[in-house]
Image (cartoon, coloured by chain):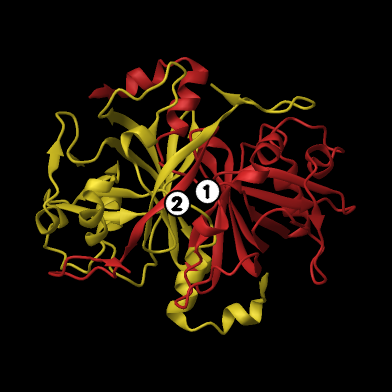
Chain colours: A yellow, B red
Amino acid sequence: MVHYSTTAIENMEKSFRVNFINSLSGFKSSNLVATVDKQGNPNLAMFSSAVHLGADPALMGLVSRPRSVERHSVENLLDTGLYSINHVNKKILKAAHQTAARYPREQSEFDATGLTAEYLEEFAVPVVAESQLNIVMKLVEAIPIEVNNTEFIIGEIKKVIVRGNVVNYDGFIDIEALGSVSLSGLDSYHETQRIGRLSYPKPDKEPRFIP
Amino acid sequence: MVHYSTTAIENMEKSFRVNFINSLSGFKSSNLVATVDKQGNPNLAMFSSAVHLGADPALMGLVSRPRSVERHSVENLLDTGLYSINHVNKKILKAAHQTAARYPREQSEFDATGLTAEYLEEFAVPVVAESQLNIVMKLVEAIPIEVNNTEFIIGEIKKVIVRGNVVNYDGFIDIEALGSVSLSGLDSYHETQRIGRLSYPKPDKEPRFIP
């Protein structure tokens, strides 16, 4: 057992600290966020911070990078009000990771990585054709997080595309069967193996695995 | 391939919709949040919304439930300014899930589920002894999310306990080796199997797996 005090954390070498702190929240989602700028040029970037916010209205959150660095995706979605969130699977893992390289603003990460921008009829923003689950989002609000100059970006779910027969009778989407991968730390990717679904918890009744 | 329009989502039966929308963000973290009320009575609850916010200062975020429901954990951490985040592993999975049952306010979920509240010298809030990774957090800010009456709770990492020899030379914590589990939807728990760590992405250089 190792204890890390506040002082120990503060004294960590920078890249050690980045790896360490990034590991603490647990397993993360792994998504590609697609946007377009005002001229319609597409952009694609990895996000590991997508989080469920509520089912009615149907909302998801994303954490932006600090305002001090270039943030093409965030600038685009603030400009246009639209973005898409696309699950990452094993086949597109390297391409997805590669979108995080520092490409110049005018370079589309779709072109750089070979991923395909697929346009739906109703929306100006593309989805990733090779992704097995696409969500088109409409910006609701970008809340400033003053303490570290980031933003919490809230969006409403406008359309969902599931590329597989994996929606259960009760609405649960089997994202493991879809091949969605999970992320830990900055750069570690994981497949999953279901332990089980547990029944709705009630006092004085032990939860059981749903067959 | 199945398309779900805004109308289709709005017309979903309530519990179907809750399962469906909860599946969309991808794999989630699975954590127990421990708090104490002003009298020192402990409380424990599952959260699947822990998210990395930044490494310097070392910050994490959590999404609260809506203000319209009882939220013992959130009220406690707003009152005391302290909480702990504890990874869930397979051995404590059922107990962890069970903390989400609607126990009365005066009932400690530690007692109800058999999990152990372990007190450190420096902090009034306990950690979960059976959890393999404990993080003591100090509240920084609770930002209201007006659109659905939830809050984004931001905290600073004050102490980390890692119960295993799993911190790599570069700071990466091998949470898979620790046995941390991942969650999808509302109630589906998953073990993980590492695909690999990918090298830092650079333009014009394909990422490779780090041995």
Q: Which residue is drawn at 40% across and 64% down?
A: A186
Q: Is residue B73 above or below residue B210?
A: above
Instruction: Classify residue A11 as left or right of residue A126.
Output: right
Q: Do labels 2 and 1 touch, CB within 8 Å?
A: yes
Instruction: Classify residue A89 as left or right of residue B132.
Output: left
For the residue carrying disc 2, how many other residues have a C-alpha within 10 Å: few (<14), some (14-19), or many (20+)?
many
The amino acid at mark 1 is Ser
Q: What element carries label 1?
A: loop
Q: Is mark 2 on a helix, strand or loop?
A: loop
Q: x%, y% of residue B148?
A: 53, 36
Number of marks present in the image shown: 2
Depth order, front residue of A76/A157: A157
The tag on residue A28 is 2
Assign the N terminus of chain A to one quadrant of the image. bottom right
Q: Image quarter for residue B20? A: top left
Q: x%, y% of residue B140?
A: 63, 63
Q: Residue at x 53, y 82 (%)?
A: A12
Q: Which residue is drawn at 13% across and 57% down?
A: A108
Q: Is residue B156 above or below residue A33?
A: below
Q: On what subunit does the disc labeled 1 rest?
A: B
Instruction: Classify residue B153 as left or right of residue B22.
Output: right
The amino acid at mark 2 is Lys
Which residue carries the number 1 mark?
Answer: B29
